[in-house]
Image: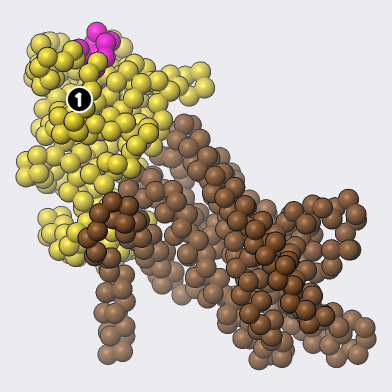
Amino acid sequence: MVASWFETREDALLTMRVELTPNGWVDDMIDSLNRIAAMTARYYYILRSSWLRLLEIIYWPAMQMLVWGFLYTYLYNSKSTMADTAALLLGAVLLWDVLFRGQLGFTFTFLEEIWSRNLANLMMSPLKPAELAASLMLMSLIRLLIGTIPVTLLTLVLFGFNIYALGPGLILMFINLVLTSWAIGLVIAGLVIRQGLGAESLAFSVMIILLPLCCVYYPLEALPAWLQPVAWSLAPTYVFEGMRATLLDGVFRADLLIEGFSLNLLYLALGFTAFIFLMDSARHRGGLLTMGE
Amino acid sequence: MSCIEQFLPGKRVVTAATNTSVTSTPENIDDAPAIAVENLCKKYRSHWAVDEVNFIVPKGWTVGLLGGNGAGKTTTIAMILGLVVPTVGRAMVLGTDMAKDRHKVLSRMNFESPYVALPGRLTVRENLTVFGRLYGVPNLKARIEELIEDFGLGDVLDRLTGRLSAGQKTRVAVAKALINEPDVLLLDEPTASLDPDRAEWVRSRLQAYQKRRGATILLSSHNMTEVEQLCDFVVIMSRGRIIAMGRPLELTERFQCKDLDEVFIHLARVA
């Protein structure tokens, strides 16, 4: 009975259309929102079709967290100077996972279209590239929340580490990292459209370049002087520096997060421009119809 | 004067056999032919996949695009859909240049090909729901019910699309192609994977739809019986160029063949 009630509500939610009847751009915007909702429903259908897929979203962050959580416990109890850095380590792992999983969620959702050879169907439908990008962002966020919320709670229960102690700043850090992950996801999706499935390995590899550069596990000063400007040009660096300031010194560095946010807006604009440019280039090269074959 | 010339009196429209182009595109969208392909060319590196192709498809007509493998049919259809940008020339649908403004008319078009799959991990119902919403179909549930009845999809509705037989997939794909009741329908070998009985059944559904809605259909096929049955007009391509066009009967008379099959073979050998 409960399942039936849920199915009915779920069905109503998924087939719901915004039914206002204004004119002009408002009308266009409502059509756009309906198409984004349609794509989100499509990705939701995929997720619910397999519990293994759903489990996979939680599995990798949970396993990672267990490994680092035990290290955290060991360092914390060792009563050495390393004990102070244990919390930093675990906080860094959690935030890095937001960045990494955010991009994976975006790119994998997009790759579903390539693997199922459905991209041509979408491209010849009224769906616009910006709407496709918006639905991928939305799905990346949903997958991220499904993956990270249980893991942060697990960390709290198993290891007593409370990432939410970062306070409201955590939300700003989360937003910053998600924006970076979307910007990178847009470029990777564009490259896959342009170059075909040969570029799909970028989905796993690109983010790893950022790992040493954006100072996830160590302060910026640990980098050689010539590399520091490069690190400052990366938005996640501001987030991880901000995290260390909060956890080590108890200081909330809003300035860092605002600077990171500004950079992220620039990244997102560049990412979207690249996505559109690469898609347009694929239309010139004639690859869209056979994409995935 | 060919029947296409008759369609647009006063406008200089010459068949592609003479390699001249449609020279006038009406301003008013309602006056425009459903599809106008003007001096269309597509070059991939050094190879011209489509080379100076010109034809128009009047509203309400069913036109067959024929040709052997590599003739340029799929590239032509892709340019008409706006999926491929022409190197030279343009493809207009309902008065809209598809390379520039395709989003203006995409909700009034649809496409079906056995070579473009629907998401296999979604059920038939989910696929129809998603595409119905993408195309902004009003009263979607009622429309899906109509399609279920028309295409006999009741028994596969809640099955994963990827697990259907080739014939069932084709039926679902054609149902998806009709979900928005398109004014312009492009079909790439729509019955390629169907047995003769099912193929005939799908053809009858397409014919019924075309008559009911007055829709325009551009159909690529290797099945000459299908083309003779469905098409008012035929465009035959070889190596990226149009080598003949006319009504099926006109073509058989012109080339002194007993049917379109023979015309096709004759032209393929000559070309």
Task: Give B2 or A81, whichever is nearer the viewer.
Answer: A81
B230 horizontally vs A256: left or right: left
Q: Residue at x 22, y 18 (%)?
A: B24
Where is residue A270? Give x, y as percent: 59, 47
Q: Is residue B20 magenta?
A: yes
| Image location (x, y in percent) of residue A218 | 84, 68
Q: Is residue A41 left or right of residue A76?
A: left
**Chain corresponding to brown in the figure:** A
Residue A259 location in percent, x, y?
A: 70, 61
Q: Mark 1 is on which residue type?
A: Pro
List the residue tagged with mark 1. Answer: B26
Q: Residues within 10 Å of mark 1 (few under 14, many from 20)?
A: few
Please state if B247 lies on the left or on the right of A74 as rendered.
Answer: left
| Residue at 34% from the left image edge and 37% from the top image edge | B101
Inspect the magenta stretch and tell me whether residue B7 lies in it: no
The vertical placement of B261 against B77, above or below, is above
Q: Is residue B172 visible?
A: no
Q: Is residue A279 or residue B205 the one in the foreground?
A: A279
Q: In front here: A287 or A270?
A: A270
Q: Colour of chain B?
A: yellow
Highlighted range, magenta: B14-22
State left or right for residue B170 relative to residue B75: left
- Most distant residue in the right direction: A80
Is the magenta region chiefly helix, strand or loop?
Answer: loop
The subunit letter for the residue under badge 1 reads B
